Amino acid sequence: MCGRHAADVPHGDGGPTHERHRIVNANPTVYDVAERSGVSIATVSRVYRSPDSVRAATRERVLAAANELGYVPSGSARGLASRSTGVLGLCFPDYSDPDAVGAEDDDAAMLYSDQIIRGMERAARRHGYALLIAASLEGGPENLVAQVAGRVDGFAVMARTVPTEELEAISRRRPVVMLAGPRAQDPSLDHLDHVEVANEDGQYELTRHLVRDHGLRRLAYVGLLDDSPDVEARFRGFRRACLEAGVEPAAEPALRMPMMTRAEGARAAGLLCEGGGDRPEAFVFANDQMAVGALQALEGLGLRVPDDVVVTGFDGIPLSRLVRPALTTVRQPMVRMGEEAVDLLVRRLSGRPPEEPVSLVLPVGVVRRASCGCDEPQGRPTTA
Amino acid sequence: MCGRHAADVPHGDGGPTHERHRIVNANPTVYDVAERSGVSIATVSRVYRSPDSVRAATRERVLAAANELGYVPSGSARGLASRSTGVLGLCFPDYSDPDAVGAEDDDAAMLYSDQIIRGMERAARRHGYALLIAASLEGGPENLVAQVAGRVDGFAVMARTVPTEELEAISRRRPVVMLAGPRAQDPSLDHLDHVEVANEDGQYELTRHLVRDHGLRRLAYVGLLDDSPDVEARFRGFRRACLEAGVEPAAEPALRMPMMTRAEGARAAGLLCEGGGDRPEAFVFANDQMAVGALQALEGLGLRVPDDVVVTGFDGIPLSRLVRPALTTVRQPMVRMGEEAVDLLVRRLSGRPPEEPVSLVLPVGVVRRASCGCDEPQGRPTTA
DNA sequence: TCTGTGGATGAAAGCGCATTCACCCTAGGT
DNA sequence: ACCTAGGGTGAATGCGCTTTCATCCACAGA
C-alpha cells in the first residue's frame, strides 16, 4: 500500500508498527486536517490552492479544523509536489570584517547590497515570491548549491561572488541573472540574463561636466586596486571624456586604493595633495564613500572644496547629499536593479521566457552639487 | 510498486504510461545520478549527507556523475525527507512608499532592517542556515504563513509586523523570536523569545548627561505619533532622567511627529523654534534621522548647534557621525540584535532548548559628540 | 422514468530525498 | 576451515503535498 494512513485505520491509534507519533503537539498535516474536518486530503489541498473549487460549507469546515490544529502547510512538501519553491534567491558578497566588531561597517559594498536586497524583496513580494539571501564569503566552500540553488526557483548573483564554473553548471538548471559587472566579462556566462548600470556613461558625463562646464584640466581618478569591472568601466568613461575634451588623460588611475572606504578616500586625498604645486584640480573618486572621506581629509588639510579642489563621487548614496559640501556624484538606481533582476527571473519562470539572454543597462544620472562648484539650487536640472 | 524507476526498466525508455519526460535537460535527480554511476540512490544520498560512510572510489564515481549531469539536490525533497529546511526567516516591516520612486528612501526603519538582516544573515550562515526575508506590508494578506512560516525552521519577527493572533498560532509550531518592542507588550506572546535593546536606559543616560553635565533645563522630547513601544520606552527614560535631576518633565513629548524622517525632524525643529523666547535649550529626538533633519533646519534658521540649542538623536546610524556638528546619540547594536536572534533560534532548534522563554536586552551606549557641546576628541569615553 | 451533465469530492500516484534495515563481503580471530 | 564483526551497499518506506482520474450525486432535459 502506498498511501499513508489507511482509511479504516484511524490515525493516531498507535499500532505497534511505525505509526505516527502520539506527541500531542506534533506538526499537523493535511491528513490531520482532513480527518478532523471529515474530508479527504485532496480537498484540504484544494481549499488552499483553489478555494473556489470547494463548496463554501466544506471550505469553512476545513479552515476551521486547520485553525484549531494550528496547521502550517509544509513548504517543502508543497515544493516537492509542485516542482517549484516560490522562492527567489540572491547571492551577494560578504565584505564584512569580523574583527571590526564595534566598527561602523557601512562599507560601500554593503550599502549596495542592502539596496539590491530591498529592491529584490519588494519585487519578489509583488510577484508572490519570497527572497532567500546568502552572502557568499570569498573562498568559502561551494555552499552555493546547497545553500541557495536547490531551494529557489531562480536567483540573482552579484558579480564575482560565485565561481564561474559553478555558476555555469547551475545556470543550466535554473534561471540566473547576473548583477553588475559587464556582460562580456566571462564569455562562458554569456547565456545569463544580466543587469548592470551605465557605469562608463555615467562617469563620462560627470567628467565631461568637470572639463567642459568647470574648465578643469588636471583631473586625478582614484580607483580600486583589485580589478573590478564596474570600477574599470567608470575609468574608461573618465578617459573618454578627457580624450574628447583634449585633456591629457592618464592611462591609469592616479591612485588605486585597496578598498573603497572612507578611510581610504581620506588617505588618497592626502597622497594626492602631497605633490604640492601640481596638485590636481579635481579628485574623481570611483565611489561616494571614498569621496566623503576625502572631503573630511581635505577639510583637515585646510583645503576648501570646491574652491581649492573639486571632489566627485559615484553611486549617489544618501550620505552624498548630506555632507558639506554636498557631493557631486552619479546616481545609480540600485533598488531598481534588484527589481529588474526579479522581473527577469519571473519572466523566465513564467510561460513565455525570452529566447535570447537579456542584458539590461540601467541609466544613471549625474547629480551636480556643491563639491564641483555647482550650487545645490542651480544644480538641480540633472538631479532626477 | 511504490518505488519509482523499476530496476529493470531503464529510466527514460519512455514506456507508454506515465514515464519520466524525455526532455534532455530535465532536472536530474538522485535516480539519474545513481543510474549513471551504477549505485543505488541511497549511496548517492550518502555521498552528500555523510561522505565518510562511502568508499572513496564509489564517492568519486558518484560525484563525477553528478557533475556531468549538473545535478542540483532538491531542497524541497531534502526538507521533506529530513523534516527541516535549513532556512531561518525574518519578517520586517515595509515602510517604503511605492509612489516615491526616485526618492531617497533611506527611512530609519529601513536602515534598521538592513542592519538586522545583515546580522541575521551572517549568524545564520555561520550556523549553516540560509536566510529567508519577507517584508510584511501593513494590512497585507496573512501571507506570512504561506510565505515564510512553512518554509523555515524558525524565524524572527520585528515587532508589530505580524498580527498577534497569527503569530501566536505559528509560534506553537516553530520557534519564533520577537525583535524590538518590549517583551510584555502582548501577554499572549509571552512565550516567545525576545531580543530588544535598552531603549529606556539609553535615553535615560543621554538625558542625564544633558542635564547633569551640560546643565540644561528646558528639554523638548520629539517622539512619534503612532504608539511605538521603543519610542515610548525612550521617552520614559527621558522622563526618568528629568525627574531625577529635578527638572520639570513633560508628561508628554513636546512633539509627536507622524514619521521619523529627516523631513519631519526639520519640521519639528521649525515648530519648536516658533515659540521665540522660550525656545527649549535642547531638542531630544527619538531617532537620528529626525535629529539630522533638525540640524539642517536649524542651520537654515541661523541657529548654532550646540551653542544656541543642543540636539541629540538615537540609534547611532553612520550618518550621525558624519553630519556637522556630529550628532550626540545612543548607539544601538542592531547587527548584533540580528545575530542574537539567530543564536536564539538555533538554540531552540538544536537538542537542548532553554525551557523558559529567553528575553535579551542588549546594552546601548551613549555617544557624546559635538551636537550636545562635547567635543569629538574628549567625547570619546562612552564611544564604545 | 431514463439519460446526460457538470460540480464536488475521493483514491491513488508520485514529487526527490533521507533513512532504516537487511544483506553481502572481507578480514580477523580461533 | 569456521565463525564473527563490521564496513559498504541496496531495497524499501515515508516525509506532506499536488494533481490527475474516477466516482458520486443532484438535477435538467427528454
Image (cartoon, coloured by chain):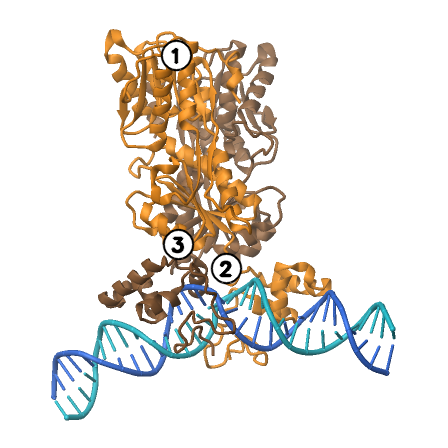
Chain colours: A brown, B orange, C cyan, D blue
Distance in Å between CA atoms under marks 3 and 1: 60 Å
SS at circle 1: helix
Q: Position of residue A71 (x, y in %)?
A: 37, 59
Q: Position of residue B228 (x, y in %)?
A: 32, 32
Above/below status of A180 relative to A319 = below
* Residue type, label 2: Arg
Disc 3 target residue: A347
SS at circle 3: helix
Q: Position of residue B301 (x, y in %)?
A: 30, 11
Dot 1 crowding, Cα within 10 Å, few <14, some 14–19, many 20+: many
Give whichever of discs 2 and 1 has the lower sequence position.
2
* Residue type, label 1: Val
Above/below status of A88 relative to A3 = above
Above/below status of A329 relative to A198 = above
Disc 2 target residue: B83
Name the residue nearer the viewer: A256 or B213. B213
Distance in Å between CA atoms under marks 3 and 2: 31 Å
Chain of the residue under the numbered disc 1 shown in the image: B
Residue found 36% across the figure and 48% down from its top: B167
